Every structure is written in structure tokens, then in C-alpha cells.
Amino acid sequence: MSLTKALVLLAVAFSCFVSSVCRANVVRNELHHLAPQEAYEIGMQLRWQYKWYDAQQYLKFAANHGITNAMCMYSIMLLSDGATSTNSTKAYRYAKKAAHKGSECGVVLLANLSSQDHNPLGASKVSLSEDEDSLSNDSDFISVLFAVNTTDTFTEHSDEYYERLKMVSGNGNAIAQYALATAYQLNQFSGGFILSSSRNKEIRRLYKASADQGYIPAINAYVGLLLDDENYEEVSQYVQVAVRQGSANEILALADSYAIGGNLSQFKQNTILAASYYKVYFDSMAIDPFYPDFYNVEKASYESLVRTMSTEQKIKSEDLANQYLAAHKVRAFDDYWYLDQVKIAIQ
């Protein structure tokens, strides 16, 4: 390596270090002016946007000031950083605090962490049979379901668990409907179906019921079924529902559709709209740590598209993007969304 190249790399590294230090100071200053609940909500929004470092600062602040959901999420994010002894110890402490405050999510996290002496993190199996019987309402059960899915603690469930899931689903809970449909689809639960056609019909019904309540993971699943059917008109309707909620994946899908055109008559090739949706996505979202290459490929598509646009087109696309961003919060709706939904009915 030449001396010049080495100096350039050193300068870049130093610049990144200074930038991170400055950002950390900004976050600390902001936290002094926030209520704990506000810090929790900002932290979750940042988490949904894959801005993990900043998210942890806000969630830690909220957790240290008594917000139970923040304790759970901060514990989970510590584990996501890697199964180091330091992180595991901190995660255990926050999970324990949440459990002592009556959080079912905290209880599951604590059980998982308590078994690490004999098992790799995330590989242990925890029995919740007693907890399942004692859960007082649907939201408590969904809270446990969230913790189970988030920590990957379980590889299988008891029949009693699935029967309870069926009951909660039957009560119209969108999260339970989605979870039950997924369990059927992955053959985790037979459900007593003899014919696969009957099971597939029930999967479709459950995904649709959940999607019709606006539950984003279910919309994603149901849209997949509609695409298989080439039912593009309904695909368009559900995609628009998701976009109105600020769902990052659907926004990016719209950008791609408008960029190249496709089978959806509503989404014929439109350079300005494509650039607008791309800008909405990239102004909001950081790199998904699990799929970094995907982000870079899409970013390259956006930059390539912009190079073909006139100045007037660029200005118009930026105006449209800014209008959308002024009225919506863009985020990825993954399992962590459950934390804000378990105690309220999904309308």
C-alpha cells in the first residue's frame, strides 16, 4: 500500500471517528430534554430504520427511567450485538428488571438468558406451559408470542400453545392470525387438517383477515399469495395501505415498479415517482445489517436513475418526497413492532 493511500484511509477513519463522537454528544444533549416515553418512541423509530447505535442510546435512557418495553428492547438489542459475556450480563439485568415489573416479554428473555450456561445463546428451549395457562388476556399471550419469536427461543410449541393461538386468532387479533397462518404454512402445526387444500384455504383466510386490519407482516404475506394468483389489482390496494403506514419495504417496491414498469397498471413506468419513492426510502432508512448488499444494489439503481433526469424532474421528485416525509414516518415493520402493539387493539 502506498503512503498516499494509507494517509487517505487514515483520514477517512479519523473523520468517521470524529463524526460518531459528535453524533453521540448530540444524542446525549437531546436526551436531557426528553421524557422517558418520548425517548422510547424515538428509539423504536430509529430501530425500525436500522439506526441501531442511536436507537440503543434512546432505549437505554428510557429503560433506565422505568419504561418496561424499553427494558425488553434494549436487552434484545444488546443480544443482537453479539453473544459476548458483557452484553449477556447487561441483557440479563434489563430483562430481569422488565420481568420484575410484570412484563411477559421480560420473563421469556430472562428464562432464555438463564439457560446459557449449558446452551448457546438463542438455542435453549424454555417451557411456558404454566405461563400459557395463567395468561389473563389475549394481549398478554401476544406479548409472550412476541418474545418467543424475537429471541428464537423455541423450535417447537405444545399443542396447547397452538390451541391458545387459535383461540386468540378467533377473537380477531391480527398478530395471532398472522402467527397462526405462518405456523400452518411452515408445517409447525397441523391444525387437524386432512387435506392440504383445506389448510391452504385457511392460511389465505387468516393472512387476509390480518392484512385487512392493516398488519404489515400479514400484508406482505398476503400480497405474495396475490402475486402468485396474478391478482395485480388487489396487490395494488394492499401495497397502498402499507405505504400509507410508511412501510419501508413497500415504498422501495413502489420505487422499483415505477422505475422499470410492470404488470400493475397503476404503476407504469414513471421516472419522477420512482425517484421520489427512492428518496423517501434512502432519506429514512440506514443499511439493514442483515442484508447490506441489498441496500447497496437499490442505492445504485436510485443513483443511476437520477443521472438520467433533468433538473426540473429532480426538483419535482424531491418536492413529492418531502411532502410524503412531512406526513409519514418511514420504518421497517418487523417482529419488533409487536412491542408497541401487544397492549392495544389493532384497528
Image (cartoon, helix red, strand yellow):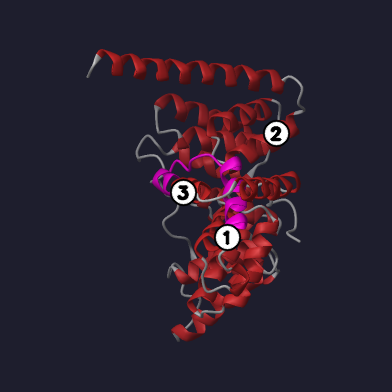
Question: Is the residue 239 above or below the residue 105 in the image?
Answer: below
Foreground disc of the pair 2, 3: 3
Q: Mark 3 points at which residue?
A: 304
Image quadrant where one finds the C terminus: bottom right
Query: Which element is circle 1 on?
Result: helix
Residue 291 falls inside the magenta stretch: yes
**Which x, y percent locates residue 36?**
73, 29
Residue 227 in the image: x percent, y percent?
51, 74
Is any part of residue 22 visible from this angle? yes
Main secondary structure type of the part rendered in magenta: helix
Which residue is painted at 40% across and 15% down in the image? 11
Tell me the distance, in whole angstroms, between the alpha carbons under discs 2 and 3. 44 Å
Q: Which amino acid does label 1 sit on?
A: Leu
- Mark 2 crowdedness (10 Å alpha carbons): few <14, some 14-19, many ≥20: some
Reading the image, the residue beneath label 2 is 67
Is 124 included in the stretch rendered in magenta? no
Region rendered in magenta: 270-297
Do callouts 2 and 3 mark residues in contact (Cβ within 8 Å)? no
Q: Label 3: how many residues lie within 10 Å, few (<14), some (14-19) or many (20+)?
A: few
Q: Are marks 1 and 2 in contact (CB under 8 Å)?
A: no
> What element does badge 2 sit on?
loop
Q: Residue at x 41, y 56 (%)?
A: 155
Looking at the rendering, which quadrant does residue 13 occupy? Answer: top left
Quarter location, residue 61: top right
Residue annotated with mark 1? 254
Viewer-nearest residue: 128 or 75? 75
Question: Which residue is pictured at 74% across the width and 33% down the height?
Answer: 38
